[in-house]
Image (tube, rainbow, N blue to C red):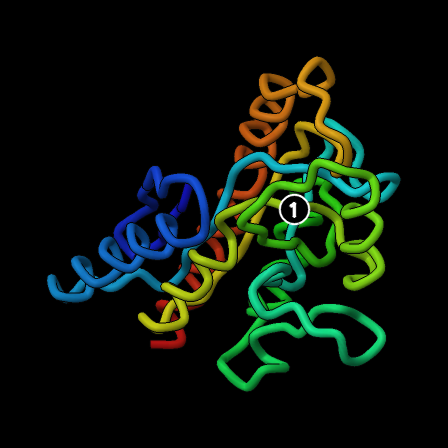
Amino acid sequence: MAVACAPAGIDVLAAGAGPAAAAARTAVALERRAAEGRPYGLVVSAGIGGGFAPLAPVGSVAVASEIVAADLGAETPAGPEPFASVAELGFGTAVHLPPEGLARAVAEAAGAAYGPVLTVSTATGTAERAALLARRHPGALAEAMEGFGVAEAAAVCGAAVLEVRAVSNAVGPRDRAAWRFAEALDALTAAFGRIVPVLDGWRDHDRRQD
């Protein structure tokens, strides 16, 4: 899900699963509004995801300090890690940074943890990969599949970006019996009830700056 904010209000978009679908649908929505002369100033990638224990337990909420493309790159035998990010390869960025003041204010209002959120194209299903990602990205709170795609679209279209995730399961071995989708969606709904006034204040400030 992507939430786009403009002076006229907030719109919600079902952005699809995975970074490619999320990027494409977010970009189309942003460009349509820009063509109408009413551009969005902020996009929020919101949904559920896996949490890295013990930093983000099931039922908690995470707000991204960094939106990281965790598996976009190339395998390599060189160096301490068998992986080079797209940034290390010289092909673009692997990290998008939300506005720090806004992101921290959103995290505080939501009672959420604040730290890196990873975007992956393949959800983690083993303890080994969970440990690998945690080592590569110290302090990572959660993984999901859309944030970086939304952030890429926002960057191209000149909009700021946030990512908010409610944790439905632990990152690691797949255990469907342990997934708590309903609880995570309830937590996300409650968080947005507290976040929207912060977003409204940010939009008011943005208008005053104009």
Q: Is residue 122 visible?
A: yes
Task: Out of 98 and 83, give the one closest to the viewer.
Answer: 83
Q: Residue furthest front?
A: 77
| 44 in relation to 30, above or below | above
Q: Residue at x 65, y 46 (%)?
A: 143
Task: Out of 135 and 13, give the one closest to the viewer.
Answer: 135
Task: Out of 103 and 137, give the one closest to the viewer.
Answer: 137
Q: Residue furthest left?
A: 36
Location of the C terminus by quadrant is bottom left
Task: Out of 75 and 209, give the one closest to the viewer.
Answer: 75
Task: Classify mark 1: helix, strand or loop.
Answer: strand
Q: Is residue 69 left or right of residue 175?
A: left
Q: Residue furthest top?
A: 177
Location of the N terminus by quadrant is top left
**Which x, y percent locates residue 204?**
41, 60
Q: Residue at x 73, y 40 (%)?
A: 111
Q: Quadrant of residue 60?
A: top right
Q: Quadrant of residue 158?
A: bottom left
Instruction: Sort mark 1 into few (<14), some (14-19) or many (20+) by Cα contacts within 10 Å.
Output: many
Q: Is residue 104 left or right of residue 53?
A: left
**Which x, y percent locates residue 208?**
38, 71
Kind of residue at badge 1? Glu
Q: Residue at x 76, y 31 (%)?
A: 173
**Mark 1 lies on residue:** 143
| 46 in relation to 199, above or below | above
Q: Residue at x 56, y 75 (%)?
A: 86
Q: Residue furthest bottom?
A: 90
Q: Is residue 40 left or right of residue 112?
A: left
**Which x, y percent locates residue 155?**
41, 71
Q: Is residue 67 visible?
A: no
**Which x, y percent locates residue 182?**
59, 17
